[in-house]
Structure formats: C-alpha cells, structure tokens
Image (cartoon, rainbow, N blue to C red):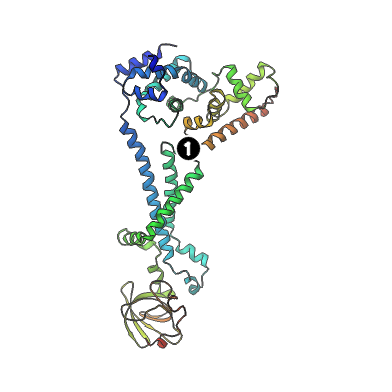
Amino acid sequence: MDEKNALTDTQLADLATKNPEAFGLLMERYQEPLFHYIRRITQLPADDIEDLLQEIFIKIYQKLNEYDSALKFSSWAYRIAHNHVIDYFRRVSARPQTNMLEDYEWEKIIHSGIHIEKDIVNKDCVEKIKICIQNLPMNYREVLILRFVEENDYEEIMDILRKPKGSVATLIARGKKILIEKMKENNINCF
Amino acid sequence: MKNLIQDTLNKIKKEHIAPEPRWKFLARKFGAWAALGLIVLLGAVSISVVYYLLSQLDWDMPEFMHQNIFIYGLSVFPYFWSILLGIFIVAAFLSVRKTETGYRFGGLKIISLTIAGIFIIGFIMSAIGFDARFNRVMMRDVPYYAQHTITKETQWMQPEKGFLAGTIRSVSGDELAINDLNGLDWDVQLDNETLVRPSADISQGQMIKIIGTKNGAHNFRANEIRPWVGQGTMGSGQYRDRMNSNGK
C-alpha cells in the first residue's frame, strides 16, 4: 500500500483501469477536496453531498480511460464534479445556493473583491456581504470560489470550467465588479 | 462522513461497473477533429468557388451598362457560397471548441486560424482548377443552382442588354454567323467602328464575346469583339483598329 501511496495521480489512474482497489487510493486523495468543493457551490446537506460525491467518483471511474495526462488529474476530477453538479441542479430544477461557506471562506472572497486596508469591523458586515455574494449569478460565484477559496490558478480553472483563459479572467473581474456594485447599492461600507 | 470509499468500491464490484473502453473516447476525439477537417474543407470549396465565380466575370461590364461598379458588384455577388462560407466558419469555430482542448484557444485565434486554413486550402483548390470543375458539376447536376448563379455565361447571354457570346460558325465579309451559348444562331454585323480586341481570333470555331446592340430576333450589331477568355487586351498590347485591317 505504501508503494501505491507514492504513485502519482496519473499512475494511480492508469492502475485503476485494471484494478478497482487502486481507485480507492484516488478516492482517498480526492474525497475531502471534492466534498468541500461541492459543499461550497451547493446548499446541500452533507448526506446529499456524499450521494453526489459517490456518483461523481463512479463517473470518474467510468471515464478513467478518457483522462489525458497532459491535464492535472485534479482539474479533470473537478471538471467532472462541476459538470455533475450542474446536471444535478438541472435535473432537480433548482438553483444552487452558496450559503454553505464557512466564515473564513466568505472572507477570502470578500478580500479578493475589495482592497482591504483594515480588518472587517464587525460580523454584521460579513453577513451583509454574504447576502451580496449569494445574489451573484452562479457562474460568477463559482469562479470566485474556485479562484479565492479553492485557490486554483487560472490554468486550473480553465481546465475545470472548459473555458478559455480570457473568459476565466473576465468572469473573475466581472464577478468582483458586480460584488462591489452590489455592496455600494446596499450601502455596505464596513472597511 | 460515512465510509464513502468502501461503499463506492462495493458498488463498483456489485454492479460490475467498469471503465468505458478507450476506443470510445478516441473515436469521439478523432471524430471531433475529423468533423473540423471536413468543415474546413467545405469552407475551402466555398471560398474557391466564390473566387472562381468572381474572377471569371468581366468587371468592365458596368461601363457598358451605364451602371455603378458597386451596384454591379452587389448584383453579381455569389451570395449562396458566401453565406455557406460564413456558416462553415462558425461551424468550424464551434467544432474546435468541441474538441478536447479547444477551450484553451481564444475566439480570435480560432477564427483567424480557421480562416487562414480555409484560404490556404481554397487557394490550392483554385490552383489545381477544382473550383471550376466543382462549379460545372453543380451547374449541371444541382436543380435551381444554374438559374440562381451569375456566371460568365449568364453575364454574356443578355442580348437585350447588348451582350452576346458564342462560337463562330462562319465569317463572311463584315458578317459573322454565331451559335450562341444557348444553341441559337445569330447574324452579327461588323462595321468600321467595331473594335476587335488584339487576342480575339475571328475565325470559324472560335468562341467570342460581343458587345453591341440587338437589331432583330437573330440580328446583332457588334461594337466590340473579345475572345471568350479574358478581355483580349493581351498579345500585341494594343487594340487593333478594325477587323478588316487585319485581313480577316
């Protein structure tokens, strides 16, 4: 098992096509990150997230032969997760919400949108800003989460969302701009 | 968190879930590239036929028709092929985006490379004469295509407007007997004012273009005679004055 732990994601993916047990190791590596990613972009309770995650892992397993090692395995896995979540919400005709972020995660987004010179004055401000972020369109919200909470670089976001770099940069810039505008509209000036 | 990993592995084993075979993904991948190749090829055919249709027209005709060159251009423009070309460029763009790594390229880059590819292949098609052959097949075999395509033939078969083209059946003094492109016979009169372009060969069996006036059902007075191919200014580099002065 230790030998297997030393393998890269790509090597494990290759091995998993022949031996499902090796896929267990890949799941071990991605269980936590994918769980939190899904939690951040949806409003679902933990049980539902786990169900979704199982479906995602099975999808990843079925598509293992499609994986191209030119891409980071993590980006590819996140892409499958992203598409599956979108499909899920399309299926249940519901709009994903974003109020499942932890306070430190909200603050990461807030800091990205505003040039902060002082610490956020009070919790009330954070609550108001959360509402503004929740009201952002899904595509802006998700890209802000990927960039500032998941801390992915542009290349990774590009591979996850299958969008050109320019579009990713535009989404991030517009998302931040809309966030600031919403804060101005709501007279939020806590800094 | 429940034991998700073990549950998933159990499910995989219990339901005999297996990775999909690699050939399926490869077929999809190469299918997307093949579709792109086909679209670019069709775009190249379109651009080569557009070029062919425009290049074979005589662009000094508006002078004789007392028409603005821009209006004339609009009237002879090959809209059908141009619209198809536009559709193929858009389809190529979408097709690139459908490929595995297509999202990595910016829109401008995809459009520029697609257009460059279409032009290069179209140029090669024109150079080997594929455009003319393809257009000929379309004219012959595709219903309504011939009626709606402005070609050199339709351009020069407008006797009412003063344009006639055909093959010389006989030459007799100042009169030519012509069999036009629709198979009708015409008597064409020439006079001292008739300009015969330098490389126009006024002899039996030669194809010529005539600018003049229709005098009757099968009578035409020629003001100018050109060879079928080109404007006939090549050769001596000078206009010949009169047909008679050349001893024809």
Which chain letter goes with mark 1?
B
For disc 1, the marked residue is B104
Total tally of numbered discs in the picture: 1
How far across and how far down the image is residue B246, in percent?
40, 86
How far across and how far down the image is residue B180, in percent?
34, 75
How far across and how far down the image is residue A53, in percent?
42, 19
Q: Quadrant of residue B77?
A: bottom left
Q: Residue at x 39, y 65 (%)?
A: B151
Which SS class for mark 1? Answer: helix
Q: Quadrant of residue B227?
A: bottom left
Are there few (<14), some (14-19), or many (20+) residues within 10 Å of tag 1?
some
Q: Residue at x 30, y 17 (%)?
A: B13
Q: Residue at x 33, y 14 (%)?
A: B10
Please state which amino acid type lies under the numbered disc 1: Arg
- Front residue of this view, candidates B158 and B140: B140
Outermost residue, top direction? B2
Task: Tell me: A102 left or right of B85.
Answer: right
Above or below residue A130? Residue B64 is: below
Above or below residue B151? Residue B35 is: above
How far across and how far down the image is residue A119, in percent?
68, 19
Quadrant containing the C terminus of chain B is bottom left
Quadrant containing the N terminus of chain B is top left
- Front residue of this view, candidates A7 and A86: A7
